Amino acid sequence: MPDQVASPLPSMRDWLAGAAVPWPPAATLEAGDRVTACYSVAAAAAARTRHDKPYLRLQLSDLHGTVEARVWDDAERLANVARPGVYVGVRGRVEVFQGQRQVVVEHLERIQVDPADLGLFLPRCPRDPEELEAALNLHMASVKEQPLKKLLRHLLGPDTATGRWFRQAPAAKRNHHAYVAGLLEHTVSVTGLCTVMADHYGPVVDRDLLVTGALLHDIGKVQEIAIEAGFPYTTAGKLLGHVLLGLEMVHEAGRRLDVPDSRLRLVEHLIAAHQGRYEWQSPREPRTIEALILHHADDTDAKVQPAIDLVRASDPGWTDYSRSFGREFFKHHEGAPPDSEPDSADGKPPADPTGRPDPDTLSLFD
């Protein structure tokens, strides 16, 4: 008997059969709500209950982020369907377990996705790309020292291979800025915080060095994390991690561009020390003022942005419990505080896309 020809997979839109595109974010659904959606499978693991019944643990990804899912029925067969990297259509319901939403899968089927619809499966930075690009350009232009400026252009220029990946890469696999262009958003934010602190503390801070280090501190993530469903770590990322990869990239570029060794070593120290603590996998602890500032700016942004995302996704009142923070947050207003005054006549804040205040209003050394 000849092998049977496998039937073609249904397209995403055929499978949805008129359901909403894009589908609602799982984070906005309540326990018991029905789910009809499509996802890429970020991770899958077969497991067994205490009563030795097989089930399937899934991490599903779409433009809204990732969501946990469980398959309780027909788990062994579906483990061969829901492999990491494939696209699936899912029907089921939402449950809340230990404060975390998860989808209980009642039907799962592999689907085909048209290239034009791939944007539905990878979460993307919510900020305007042009705004982030303008902020990046302002920060790069603020560096006056020519060897450092050349280094930044070589690694972050929009027409370079590294620069193009930098503008698309996530900043992390899951904890903060875990979406396309998250690395650009995080870098711009960290650099903005560093410039405020440089202006505040005055001439004791080497501003060009600090801004250069801030812009390059996570450059290794373009090689550490793949821009695929679930943002998996690459082989290089698993073997070395973004700090060592970033040191390699900056060192090679600096030598090629004849950046003075004394300056290049200081930039490299900023990269090596930006995670701050040995127990946080930092090769070095900060040993310059600039490295200390960068570490705290990086740590602040990596913690505050996930809290902002959690609060924004919640109704007024208490948010869901966050495992990352080990607590809930209280959302006490929707936007600007009550009775706040506008920053300008048209009610809009100043146009500087970096969000950086006028240094003349901040510096203690005028």
Image (spheres, rainbow, N blue to C red):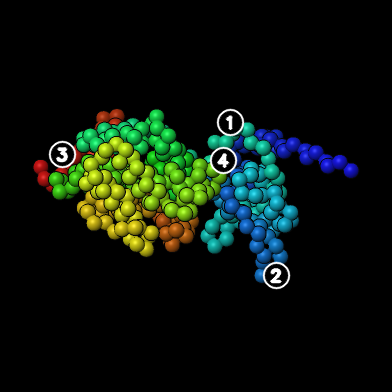
**Secondary structure state at the residue bearing disc 2:** loop
Q: Pointer 4: what residue?
A: 121
Q: Tell me how far mark 1 sits from mark 2, CA to CA.
A: 44 Å
Q: Quick check: 9 left or right of 28?
A: right
Could you tell me residue 33's position as x and y percent?
62, 50
Q: Pointer 1: what residue?
A: 116
Q: Pointer 3: what residue?
A: 360
Q: Quick check: 313 left or right of 270?
A: right
Looking at the rendered structure, the number of numbered marks drawn on it comes to 4
- Picture quarter containing residue 31? bottom right
Rate crowding at label 2 as few (under 14), some (14 to 19) or many (20 or more) other CA atoms within 10 Å. Answer: few
Q: Amino acid at mark 1?
A: Ala
Could you tell me residue 317's position as x and y percent?
44, 53
At 45% from the left and 45% from the top, the residue drawn is: 223
Q: Are marks 4 and 2 in contact (CB under 8 Å)?
A: no
Which of discs 1 and 3 lies nearer the camera? The answer is 1
Q: Relative to 327, does residue 176 appear above or below in the rendering?
A: above
Q: Tell me how far mark 4 sits from mark 1, CA to CA.
A: 11 Å
